[in-house]
Structures are given as C-alpha cells and as structure tokens.
Image (cartoon, grey):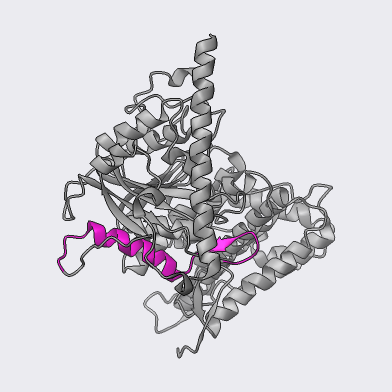
Amino acid sequence: MTMTTDSTTPGGQKVARGKAAAVKSLEVRLWETADALRGNQEPSEYKHVVLGLVFLKYISDRFEHRRHELEEALSNPDSEDYIPNPERRAKLLENRDEYSGQNVFWVPENARWGFVQAKAKLPEIGQIIDQAMDDIEKENPVIRGVLPRNYGREGLDKGRLGQLVDLIGSIGFTETDDHGSDDVLGRVYEYFLGQFAGKETGKDAGAFYTPRSVVKVLVEMLEPYHGRVYDPACGSGGMFVQSAEFVQAHGGKRTDISVYGQEFTDTTWKLAKMNLALRGIEADLGDRSADSFTNDVHPDLRADFVIANPPFNVSNWWDAKLSDDPRWKYGTPPESNANFAWVQHFIHHLAPNGSAGFVLANGSLSAKTNGEDEIRKRLLEANLVDCIVAMPDKLFFNTGISVSLWFLSKNRHGNGQRNRANDVLFLDARSLGSMESKKLRVFSDDDVAKISSAYHRWRSIEPDVPYVDIPGFAKAASIEEIAQAGYVLNPGRYVGTEEVLDDEEPAMVRIEKLAGHLLEEFDRNRQFEQQIIDQLKGLLK
C-alpha cells in the first residue's frame, strides 16, 4: 500500500495517512459515542460494561471467522477437507475441537454477537448479555469467573445499553491497517483503557493502566525477545501486551515469551485476563487476585525479565509475617513505604542473568530516612543497579509528578555485552515528550528511541557503536562518584547541564529544566527537615 504524509495519533505516535489514520479515527469515534452513552454511570463502573462488551464482540468475531474458514473448506470440492454430506458438515461446524485447536474460544449460539445484537432493542437486553457471559464462561474454563455481569441491574439504562451494543457491533475484527495488524478490537480496547484512566480520580487510574509512553520505554530498553516475563503489579496487562508486540515487531512469535503476573485488585485482575485473552496471549496470573507481598502466587519463579509499574509510596502494605522474609536481602523495607519492598521483590524473582525495568517515585532516588538510603547503598554495592532514567512530569493520568525508571541486572559483567560492573548510566529525559492535552504528556517514537538507544550504546561491545556522555542528558558515573554523592541516584546530579547557547534553546525548555532542578532542591530540603525531626524525636524519647 502506498503511504502518504504522516499524521499524529492521540497516543502521540506517527502513522501514515490512509487506513491506519482511519482506524484511529474509528477508535476516537467509538469512544466519543460510548462516553456519551454513559449517562449517570461512574467511569469506574462503566468501563467494565464497555470493555466486557468489547471482549464479547472480539471472541464472537474470532469464532465466526473460524467458522467461515471451516465452512469453506468443508464445502469446497477442491479442498482436501471436503465433506459432501451436508449433515456431517453441519455437525463438524459445531464441533468445539475445530475451534479450540486453533486457539479460538467456543461461543454458544445464544452468546454469539449476531444473536445478542438482534435483541439490542429489547428491554431484557441486560439479562440476555448476562446469560451470554455465563454461558461463555461455562464453555471456556480459562476465563471462568472473569467476565463482567450485572448488565441486567436496575441502574443501567437499557436503552443506552442497546445503543452501546449497536455501536460496538460496528467494529470489524477482520479490518487491517498499514501496520499489518488485524487487532483492531485490541487497539480499541487499549484506547478505551487509556480514556477511562483519564476519567478516573485519585489512584484508581494508575491501578489498572500504565500509559503507553512509559511502557514502551521499559520494553524497548529491556528487549524481552524471549524468556519469562513477570509483572507482580500487572494492572490490566499492558506490560505483557507491549512485550508481545515487541517480539512480533522483531520477527518473533508471541509464544517466544512466557507471561507471569499478579494483581491485587480483583476487578483489575479480571481486566488483565480479558485483555490478554483478547490478544491471544497465554498468561499465568494465578487463579485469583492476590497481594504479591503476603500471597506470592509465583514463589518459585525466576524470570528473565521483570517489567512493572507498582503503586507509588504505599504506606499500608506491611504485615507482621513479613518481618523475616527472605526477599529482604538488602535490608528490611520501612513499614511506611513499600517502594524498596517492590524493588527487592523484583530482584528475588530474577533469574541469574535476569534484568528488571520498573517505575518508582522520585523520592526513592535520594530518601535518607527509615533505612532506605542503606538499602540503596547495598543495591549499588551488590552491582545490581544498571541505569536510572529521570522522566518528565504529567506522564500519568492520576498524578502530575515526575517519576524515574530503574533498570537492574543480575549480570553486569559481560554476557556478550560491555562489562558495566563499575558504573551506572544516568539519563535525564525530563525535557522530552510533548503535551497531548493540558494534563497529559506523551513520548513520540523518536523520544523513546533517544532514551533506549543511549542505553544500548552504553551496553554494547561493538566498536562501531561507541558510547559518549552527552552533557545534560547522559552520563556514565562510577560507583566512586555515586558514593561521594551519598549514594543519591538523581540523574540531574550527574549529567550536568546541556551545552547550548541561550538563544538556541526555547524558553519553555529552559524553564522546565530550571523547575526540575528547583524541585530537586525542594526534595533535598524536605529530606533534611525530616532528618532533623527524627533526631529531635530521638532526643525527646
């Protein structure tokens, strides 16, 4: 297909005009209409209504697609599968093995989308959908207990529900775009997840959705081509989806990676099961939602890659039975903050050559209270910290604060790559990205490439791929330098200032950088104040 000039999607990525742009406009149009049909439903509840119907449409389309293929093969005299007897053909069309053998869910007749949509205008449409969800789960144990119910509840307007059924019925599974993807429903599902996250309040958005900009940086830097991928705070499964897309984009198959996850919130765990089933990604998320600290559903797993966005600064995570937990190899985390509990949980689950990439609140880079500084020091002395990336603010729906990405590795001595045992790479990406709206910043593909390519150059042993420090952006600092700085890991402390004339740099970029440095100083002052308070409390005891 001939491509014309590029345009930018709502996700911040450039796509060719034509069919790819049309698919994105389909996502936008569907969202705008679906949101208008929400009425008085809260986003936290309505997202399950919409996403459950998207899932139902997807598996029904896959089923009908397979049924059509089978029917053509059985009725074509030139096909080796040809069966002249109409009764035998009809019987084979209803043989579930012909579907499950192709990784297609078996969909009972009264749960198929055509049956449901034909009854969209009836007042009992809610009960019809609930029955369809029940029947699908009975026939497909892998999603038992996962699909949403309660479409027949009194508070859900049945007229709007019927309109929503008709709307989702307009999505065609077999559509393709210029990227060669037939996963239009998957793209719609992800777009809706992001839009619902934008409408959530407080921490709810971050509980089930990590923005694609952040996920893509993590995946592009870790490069999970094959092996076991683990996320113990998996939300709706975005890390796994992007990992599978990465593998396929580089010529591999989704089966090249094995997926393991865990999720604390039950409704979010169900979203993840639906999201992964919708993409055809087999995953072990345990048989129920559970707390990764007190009920680790993969205790013996040693993963090749850990990719995670755990909840920030959780203060109510501690349980008395965690006191002597073997995961706290580098120090018992403070009961008031789970950040370094997550870090050590990740390390505990890494294979001997495994690597981890994850998101943490910036306070973890420099906190000196409650023993966090000692844990950070021990991680550095154990030669685990590979790279720290300072990210800009406004990347997340639920918070405007900036965060950092941590990359740890259990084998930094080579393994086909540069021996990185004596230094840590610091990258300052705070000036990257562009504002998609007043509240949300997104990364372009070029932004992601700038970060990931610097990391890969630093790790490479190829002589034609040299690494060079870039003032204001990239610095490979020795462990000795980091020790002299009190084991603080703020990239801004090491990368220095970009060498650029004032009139060559936009004013807003300079202001953002100055604001970032000022916030760092505020952070250090708060830590200093806390130290004084702690010392005073000690004197008053």
Residue 447 vertical position relative to residue 493 in the rendered view, above or below = below
Q: Magenta stretch: residue 485 in it?
A: no
- Residue stretch rendered in magenta on the structure: 435-463
Residue located at (80% from left, 47% from top):
153
Residue located at (51% from left, 71% from top):
506
Residue nearest the viewer, comparing 374 with 251:
374
Residue located at (45% from left, 76% from top):
179
Residue 47 image point, x, y percent = 68, 54
Q: Magenta stretch: residue 454 in it?
A: yes
Q: How many marks?
A: 0
Residue nearest the viewer, comparing 392 with 254:
392
Residue 169 vertical position relative to residue 129 in the rendered view, above or below = below
Residue 444 image point, x, y percent = 48, 69
Write down the quadrant of residue 324 in the picture: top left
Instruction: Look at the image and tell me in which quarter the N terminus lies.
Output: bottom left
Residue reaching furthest front?
A: 502
Residue located at (44% from left, 21% from top):
322
Asked whether residue 95 is in view, the answer is no
Residue 17 image point, x, y percent = 54, 84
Residue 426 vertical position relative to residue 83 in the rendered view, above or below = above
Asked whether residue 222 is in view, the answer is yes
Q: Is residue 407 left or right of residue 320?
A: left
Residue reaching furthest top?
A: 541
Residue 183 image point, x, y percent = 51, 69
Residue nearest the viewer, comparing 441 with 217:
441
Residue 325 vertical position relative to residue 338 in the rendered view, above or below = above
